[in-house]
Image: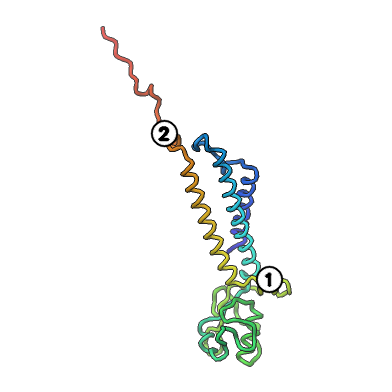
Amino acid sequence: MSFLFTLALLAIAVYVLYSAITMKGRLFATENIIEEKIPQFKKLLRGIYFGLGVIMLLMAANSGFQNLLYSEGAYRYSEDFKTFYADEITESGKLKGTDFTVNGVYSVSEMRNTLAYVQNQLPLPEDKSFEWAVPVQDEAGRDLYYGYGESELNQNETFAKLRGTLTYRTIQISNYVFMGLAIVVIVGLFVMMNKFTDKEKAAKARSVQSGNAMPSSAFEFDEEKKD
């Protein structure tokens, strides 16, 4: 996910939460709502928008962490690597003697270090190409891992701790959970709006907007004067 998408999510979340707090704006339009139910409608609408705003705020934060931690210089082991070095992989999916799993997503340095361990040789030469989505191969032509960026992740302790807590898999699962919750809330919003809508008033409004409503005088014609 790009930072532009993250900023868009953040902007929408802030707008929805602001509307929920102030109860003003187009999100609280009540033109076609049953008159006597407007107070109840606004109260329920406020709760829904609060929930939706919080969910979208979490989505924006999750997207931001994904961009910050894994969009640049993130790599994963290929299937060729897992097959060729199967003896070096434990039942739990970890490379023997390391804390790295073969299903993880790591920086260039981390990948080189684990490769150096399993190959019992020096890390890959500095002139290796780490282009976007291009598999890195060993001397025998086996794909070792796939790249997701061109520069290494920031290797300071803060980032290392964050990646330890917010793993790539955790962020991906969180994305699906938040999207699912947002869909549920939005569907609930449409159901509620349908329940509180004055069908006759809504039909008249649609008729006027489509240009089908004509004044009654349009159908009145003057009788021709008879001599």
* Residue placed under numbered mark 1 in the picture: 162
Disc 1 packing (10 Å; few <14; some 14–19; many ≥20): few
CA distance separating discs 2 and 1: 57 Å
Q: Amino acid at mark 1?
A: Leu
The numbered mark at residue 149 is none
Quarter of the figure with the C terminus: top left
Mark 1 lies on a secondary structure that is helix
**Of the pair 155 and 193, the residue shown nearer to us:** 193
Q: Is residue 98 above or below residue 205?
A: below
Q: How many marks?
A: 2
Residue lying at the far top of the rendered structure: 227
Q: Is residue 222 above or below residue 83?
A: above
Q: Is residue 75 left or right of residue 222?
A: right
Discs 2, 1 touching: Cβ within 8 Å: no
Query: How far across and down, in percent of the image, does residue 220 sit?
Result: 34, 20
Residue shown at 62% from the left, 48% from the top: 15
Query: How far across and down, in percent of the image, does residue 180 sit?
Result: 52, 60
Residue shown at 49% from the left, 52% from the top: 187
* Residue placed under numbered mark 2 in the picture: 211
**Of the pair 20 and 155, the residue shown nearer to us:** 20
Query: How far across and down, in percent of the image, does residue 114 sit?
Result: 63, 85
Residue shown at 59% from the left, 70% from the top: 170
Earlier sequence position, callout 2 versus callout 1: 1
Residue lying at the far left of the rendered structure: 227
